[in-house]
Image (tube, grey):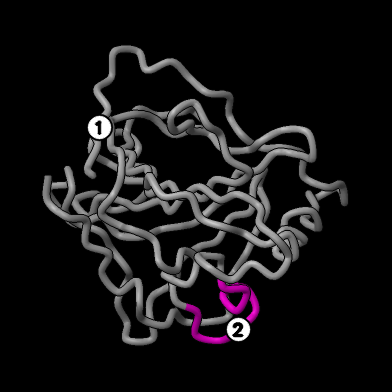
Amino acid sequence: MPELLLAYYDVPLESPLKLSSNGHLDLIIPKTTGGHKPYVIGASLNTQYEAESIHFHWGSAETLGSEHEIDNKRFDIEMHIVHRNMRYPDMNEAKKHPDGLAVLAIMYMFGRPNAITRTVNPKFFRGSGPRLNELFPKLKANNFFTYNGSLTSGNCEESVTWIVFAQELTMTKLLTSIFSSIQDSNGGHLKPNYRQIQPLNNRTVFYRP
């Protein structure tokens, strides 16, 4: 399987970033300062997929919040970077097609407060000119699982090529305060927002070592 190319992921984005909470923390990905949108191509994708948004799924003090398991292991937080097939004009149209979306899934576990290796760079959320790859430093981007599946919220449209990275990253406890402080429109804290693990339903999962 070809390598996965992350284009413009290392170029600063226009800032400030816009965060919203609609059941999960949602970030609309703007253009880079050079006027480009980050995109992915390669792996099992036969065309370019443009980055649209990022959101996170998490649990609680008692539950793990990832929506995938790797070797029967779940994780504290799962991040999804949603991409739209550039053949389609918008997300609503892309959701109607089996090749409409590509979602990169990255798993995080909580580390020690002073953990540095492979952790999310906090500057991404509060600095100017953040880069997408600051969310997953030192990730082995060509070690992943991939399969055809669905979205995990809304109508769960069967329009997603999933690319689930095999490497587990670290997120410090200090950074998790950004999740615990998020509130909904009524001023209440967002509850665990993950979908339960689903059966494969005869899907084939491919692995690129």
| Residue 16 within the magenta-colored segment of the rendering | no
Q: Are marks 2 and 1 in contact (CB under 8 Å)?
A: no
Circle number at residue 115: none
Q: Where is mark 2, residue-wise?
A: 127
Which residue: 75% across, 65% down? 174
Q: According to the image, label 1 marks what residue?
A: 98
Drawn side of residue 36 relative to residue 168, left or right = left
Of callouts 2 and 1, which one flags the residue occurring earlier in the amino acid sequence? 1
Kind of residue at badge 2: Gly
At 50% from the left edge and 65% from the top edge, which residue is drawn?
Answer: 118
Mark nearest the camera among 2 and 1 is 2
Q: How many marks?
A: 2
Q: Which residues are magenta?
A: 121-130
For residue 131, above or below residue 72: below
* Quadrant that contains the N terminus: top left
Residue at image point 56% right, 50% down? 108
Q: Is residue 141 left or right of residue 63?
A: left
Can the viewer see residue 68 in this picture? yes
Q: Nearer the viewer, residue 85 or 7?
A: 7
- Quarter of the image with the C terminus in it: top left
Where residue 155 sits: x, y (%)? Answer: 49, 28
Residue at horizontal 27%, vertical 64%?
6
Q: Residue 127, how many percent across, how many down?
A: 60, 84
Crowding near the residue tagged with mark 2, few <14, some 14–19, many ≥20 C-alpha atoms within 10 Å: few
Amino acid type of the residue that numbered disc 1 sits on in the rendered structure:
Pro
Left or right: 183 with respect to 175?
right
| Image height of 157 relative to 22, above or below | above
| Local secondary structure at mark 2 | loop
Q: List x then y, in percent, for residue 41.
A: 19, 56
The majority secondary structure of the magenta stretch comes to loop
Q: Real-space Cα distance between discs 2 and 1?
A: 37 Å
Q: Quadrant of residue 57?
A: top right
